[in-house]
Image: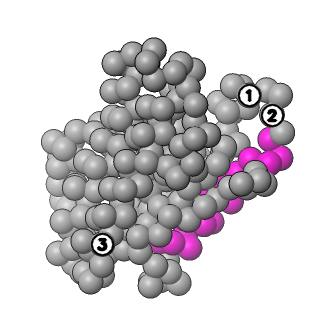
């Protein structure tokens, strides 16, 4: 059996940065989500280092099919980074459309729920595993998200989901934690905020090292944590 690290949201800038970071380490990295392509992954990281899993992250049947394929290849998921998410804002709540509200809940909360429900049974059966959710500073600082209430509510819900589930798994050998980054230095954020001081933002590579610690045996006694990763932003 080979052990695998699943990274959801691997088609996005942050997820791709996590894939690049963890592909240099020991476990097989499974890049899950929309827009992932095996040939592209092989070119970037080397043949055999990563597996593409172009699945719909908020779909339980997609997860079941994906995990069955891994099992057929003698691959077990022992760790996961839930990096899928999204942001839409710009209007106060009373002007927020149902589409924006639903899309924020689906991208940031529902994808986390379905992912956890898919990954946990195997980990609990084996009595080991580690999962890290990429939440947001907005999870605990919603007052800073005026005109993005749907995003703040979804991220707060995802953090609550992780911490409640971590409590359920506390004696099982399975750990679940969250990190709370402030603005991450991605091309999309630079384009959206061209006048911002990007030197104060969180680097994806720095966030990856924090996640690596939480996944590792060095953090064996850490579960249910919500770790602030605020960069150089004053709080």
Q: Is residue 188 left or right of residue 7?
A: right
| Quadrant into which the C terminus falls | bottom right
Query: Residue at image x 18%, y 59%?
Result: 72
| Quadrant into which the N terminus falls | bottom left
Q: Position of residue 177 (x, y in %)?
A: 44, 66
Circle 3 — which element?
Answer: helix
Q: Position of residue 54 (x, y in %)?
A: 34, 38
* Dots 1, 2 in contact, CB < 8 A: yes
**What is the distance, in whole Å, between disc 3 and disc 2 at their CAs?**
38 Å
**In the image, which disc is placed on residue 196?**
2
Which badge, 3 or 2, is on the more N-terminal residue? 3
Is 218 in front, or is 51? 218
Is 162 in front, or is 11? 162
Q: Which residue is mark 3?
A: 167
Q: Quadrant of residue 185?
A: top right
**What is the distance, in whole Å, between disc 1 and disc 2 at their CAs?**
6 Å
Query: Residue at image x 66%, y 45%?
Result: 184
Magenta stretch: give its range: 198-215
Q: Is residue 82 left or right of residue 23?
A: left
Question: Within 10 Å of the Cα at label 3, are there few (<14), some (14-19), or many (20+) other Cα atoms?
Answer: some
Question: Within 10 Å of the Cα at label 2, are there few (<14), some (14-19), or many (20+) other Cα atoms?
Answer: few
Q: Which residue is mark 1?
A: 193
């Amino acid at each position: 059996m080979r052990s695998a690290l699943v990274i959801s949201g691997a088609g996005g800038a942050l997820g791709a940065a996590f894939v690049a970071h963890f592909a240099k380490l020991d476990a097989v990295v499974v890049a899950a989500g929309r827009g992932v392509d095996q040939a592209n992954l092989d070119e970037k990281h080397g043949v055999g280092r990563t597996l593409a899993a172009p699945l719909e992250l908020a779909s339980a049947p997609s997860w079941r099919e994906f995990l069955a394929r891994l099992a057929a290849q003698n691959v077990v998921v022992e760790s996961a980074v839930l990096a899928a998410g999204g942001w839409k804002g710009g209007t106060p709540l009373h002007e927020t459309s149902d589409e924006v509200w639903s899309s924020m809940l689906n991208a940031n909360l529902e994808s986390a729920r379905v992912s956890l429900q898919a990954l946990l049974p195997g980990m609990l059966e084996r009595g080991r595993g580690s999962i890290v959710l990429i939440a947001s500073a907005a999870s605990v600082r919603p007052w800073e998200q005026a005109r993005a209430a749907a995003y703040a509510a979804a991220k707060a819900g995802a953090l609550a989901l992780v911490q409640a589930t971590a409590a359920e798994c506390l004696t099982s050998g399975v750990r679940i934690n969250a990190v709370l980054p402030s603005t991450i230095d991605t091309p999309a954020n630079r384009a959206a905020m061209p006048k911002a001081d990007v030197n104060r933002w969180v680097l994806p590579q720095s966030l990856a090292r924090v996640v690596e610690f939480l996944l590792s045996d060095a953090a064996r006694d850490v579960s249910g944590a919500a770790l602030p990763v605020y960069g150089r932003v004053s709080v």
